[in-house]
Image: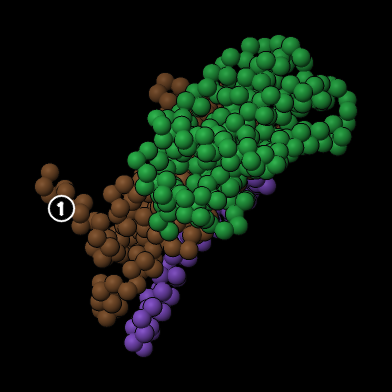
Chain colours: A green, B purple, C brown
Amino acid sequence: MNALRALLHRDLTLAYRRWGELMTPILFFILVTALFPLGLSPRPELLREIAPGVVWAAALLAGLLGQESLFRSDYEDGCLEQLALAPLPLELQALARTFTHWLGAGLPLVILSPLLGLLLQYPAAAMPELAFGLLVGTLTLSLHGAIGAALTVSLKQNGMLLLVLVLPLAVPVLIFGAQSAAQAARGEDPSGALYLLGAMLVLGLVLAPFAIAGALRISLES
Amino acid sequence: MKSLHEFLTMGGYAAYVWPAYAVAAVVLLVNAVLPGLRLKRRLVELKERGSRGERS
Amino acid sequence: MNISWTWFHRLASPPYFYRLAGRLAPWFGWLALVCIVAGLYGGLWYAPPDYQQGDGFRIIYIHVPSAYLSMMGYTVLAVSAGIGLVWRMKMAHAVAAAVAPLGASFTFLALVTGSLWGKPMWGAYWAWDARLTSELILLFQYFGFIALSRAFEDPRSGEKAAAVLALVGIVDVPIIHYSVVWWNSLHQGSTVFVGAGSDIATSMLAPLLTMIAGFTAFFAACLLKRIQLELLERESDAAWVRQLLEDA
């Protein structure tokens, strides 16, 4: 456990030092969401309709933005090899790394979501459901993104490849996330969609670490 | 049974049915022919390389 | 038990599989031809027009076999990639690499024929319902597998990374299959296999089953040839290949 804590501490310190980099997904999230009323029309009825989808799609893209380099710097300077050889299981390390990434990239989105919902005329009464859905969803998306990042860490220039690889996994999260937000906005019960989101998160938590670690080992071999 | 006219016009749905079958024919044909051609070509290439005494 | 294990081990040997594939492929090819011709006759000529859809329903004879093979293909892909990854069998990776473009072709065909069928019946070439969306995602999964396996400098790493991806994506196949059960889908439910619910006429069903058989045999024939090609590419330096070229 000491090793795990040390790893978490290291990742958080690095993230804190590079907080400028962290701002990118957050700024992206805000800008993309803000572009829609500017680009389409500021009509409240229209915005209210598209708000769930826009917020979720923006969160997905913003999350993926920072994910490409999740393991890259460690891969390039040889740290990753050492970490793979460490007694702490690589699967656990992968989970820890993904979590710290989420703290910097996913959690801010969750916190900002009510504000952005406001920009898109999303009903204030449904904000808790929106934020909660995003909490579960962004965690899952971070796991998916980490799988993609691990698979492509040894490749050069491949931003689009990561997106293509992660998309099949991310689309169901997007669909059910946006659905839960839309249901909450209409006053309907979103728990069905939220349960499915939760199920996807649990599945991801259980399986993704193995996929991430396996992919990292393969990338280290190449 | 059926008249040739009915067959060709597919009861009015010809614009959908025939293109669908056409695309299928293309996909099947390409998949049937391409591997065989590539296989033959590769065998020829490898044979030439072998007789020239090169290693790949 | 002893016999089947020996057979399995022999199957994993590239030269044995290559020769076996070469012998089997023509048989599957002819079987495919016979079944497809019979199915086309039955489907396009013999079967009567549908009560609701007229002659437009005849797209089913291409659409259903393609959709079935798109899912079966991905299952073969994921299973063989998984076997290659876990048991480190290069033969298995060759099978996976061979299946990918084939499966992608049939996914594409299923989407196109489905779209052409949907326009006259539902009024739209496309709808974002569960089954269509998940089938489209399947196409992307095939593309992702092919792209990832080729992105690596070392092809051995590429096939392993792609194998991880294939395994991760296998969840999509049951989603596609059960999407019409789990959601209010625009797409109709199961035509063939639902016991009490399916009331398709025999004159329509028989050609469909024939076409499914024909397409599957075709898939098998093409797959065997593609595996042969993969094996040649991967083992071009091996002794068995040199022997093969001498024999030819």
Question: Which residue is found at the position 34% from the left and 87% from the top?
Answer: B53
Q: Tell me: A169 left or right of C87.
A: right
Position in image of residue C241 (x %, y %):
29, 73
- In this rendering, does residue C238 appear at all? yes
Q: Chain of mark 1?
A: C
Identify whether B34 is placed above or below C5: below
* Towards the viewer: C6 or A198: A198
Picture quarter with the C terminus of chain A: bottom left
* Residue count near mark 1 (Cα–Cα under 10 Å), binned few <14, some 14–19, many ≥20: few
Identify whether A147 is placed above or below A33: below
* Towards the viewer: C230 or C84: C84
Residue that sits furthest to the left in the current view: C2
Image quarter of residue A64: top right
Question: Which residue is found at the position 42% from the left and 20% from the top?
Answer: C196
* Towards the viewer: A17 or B34: A17
> What residue sits right under mark 1 in the picture?
C6
Question: Which residue is found at the position 86% from the left and 37% from the top?
Answer: A39
Amino acid found under the numbered disc labelled 1: Thr
Picture quarter with the N terminus of chain A: top left
